[in-house]
Image (cartoon, grey):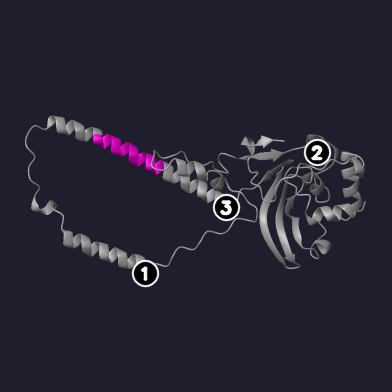
């Protein structure tokens, strides 16, 4: 059977006639949806998961943007992953980048500006019938760095509190007058200024750090959503690290739809 006819047949069989179809809920393009997953067991039991049908299954999920070029091809009874038609269009599109039938499929959302010019935006993967949004690499790095800084700050705070306790005990036990510090422990101001001058000159010779890569158009990161909370807690105790897209939002911990 022709792949385009199969695409239309599976969509009609699952959703009814074309006039009665209920589109999946619309989501703003680029929305961070790494905290949820989608699975339709009825569809999986009815149709196989292969290269020809996988996009129709993906189109049922809330990750699908109905304004994409693939949807235009579906309405014209053309296979939505036909690269010969997609390459002649511009705008948002989805592309099947990897497939290990029937367990693993990788779909990339990208913006096409020409036949050979595309900008990757987001990546989704279908693992054993469950659809997930892959976290962005910058979000993973930010979460890991935040977690590391949090634990280091907490370790220093604990060490400082213990040292303060020891200092108080020593002060109470010490009854003799404090002795003057030997000359070797005195601070040499000239030496300090010389070291500061060397460090300042080295710092000026270093190239400025490159700016971080920009987020895809419309992407709303978890860091931006929690920016107000971070500003409101400055000066206080170190806050818990932000949620890790892999450790805290793995496939087993996401809400299922």
Residue 51: image x %, image y %? 80, 51
Residue 24 x/y as whole percent? 78, 42
Q: Find out whether residue 28 is within the magenta segment.
A: no
Please rate how many residues cluster around mark 2, counting C-alpha atoms within 10 Å: few if below 14, some from 14 to 19, many from 20. some
Q: Which mark's residue is nearer the viewer, 1 or 2?
A: 1
Q: Nearer the viewer, residue 74 or 50?
A: 74
* Number of the label disc, if any, that sits on residue 205: 1
Q: Which residue is mark 2?
A: 44
Task: Indicate which disc, 3 or 2, sits on the residue closer to the N terminus.
Answer: 2
Mark 1 lies on a secondary structure that is: helix
Q: Position of residue 152 (x, y in %)?
A: 39, 43
Location of residue 112 (image quadrant): bottom right
Mark toward the start of the polypeptide (1 vs 2): 2
Q: Is residue 8 visible?
A: yes
State the residue position of label 3.
137
Label 2 residue SS: helix
């Amino acid at each position: 059977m022709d792949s385009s006819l199969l695409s239309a047949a599976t969509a009609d069989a699952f959703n009814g006639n074309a006039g009665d179809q209920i589109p999946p809920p619309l989501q703003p393009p680029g929305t961070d949806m790494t905290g949820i997953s989608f699975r339709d067991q009825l569809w999986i039991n009815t149709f196989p998961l292969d290269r020809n049908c996988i996009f129709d299954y993906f189109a049922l999920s809330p990750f699908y943007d109905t304004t994409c070029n693939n949807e235009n091809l579906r309405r014209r009874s053309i296979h939505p992953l036909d690269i010969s038609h997609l390459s002649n269009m511009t705008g948002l599109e989805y592309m099947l980048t990897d497939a290990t039938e029937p367990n693993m499929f990788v779909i990339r959302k990208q913006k096409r500006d020409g036949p050979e010019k595309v900008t990757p935006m987001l990546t989704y993967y279908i693992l054993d019938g469950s659809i997930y949004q892959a976290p962005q690499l910058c979000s993973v790095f930010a979460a890991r760095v935040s977690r590391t800084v949090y634990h280091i700050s907490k370790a220093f705070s604990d060490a400082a509190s213990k040292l303060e306790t020891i200092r108080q005990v020593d002060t109470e036990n010490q009854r003799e007058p404090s002795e003057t510090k030997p000359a070797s422990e005195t601070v040499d101001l000239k030496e300090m200024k010389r070291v500061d001058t060397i460090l300042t000159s080295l710092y000026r010779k270093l190239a400025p750090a490159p700016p971080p890569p920009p987020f895809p158009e419309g992407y709303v990161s978890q860091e931006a959503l929690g920016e107000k909370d971070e500003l409101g807690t400055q000066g206080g105790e170190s806050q818990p690290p932000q949620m890790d897209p892999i450790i805290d939002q793995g496939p087993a911990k996401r809400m299922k739809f």
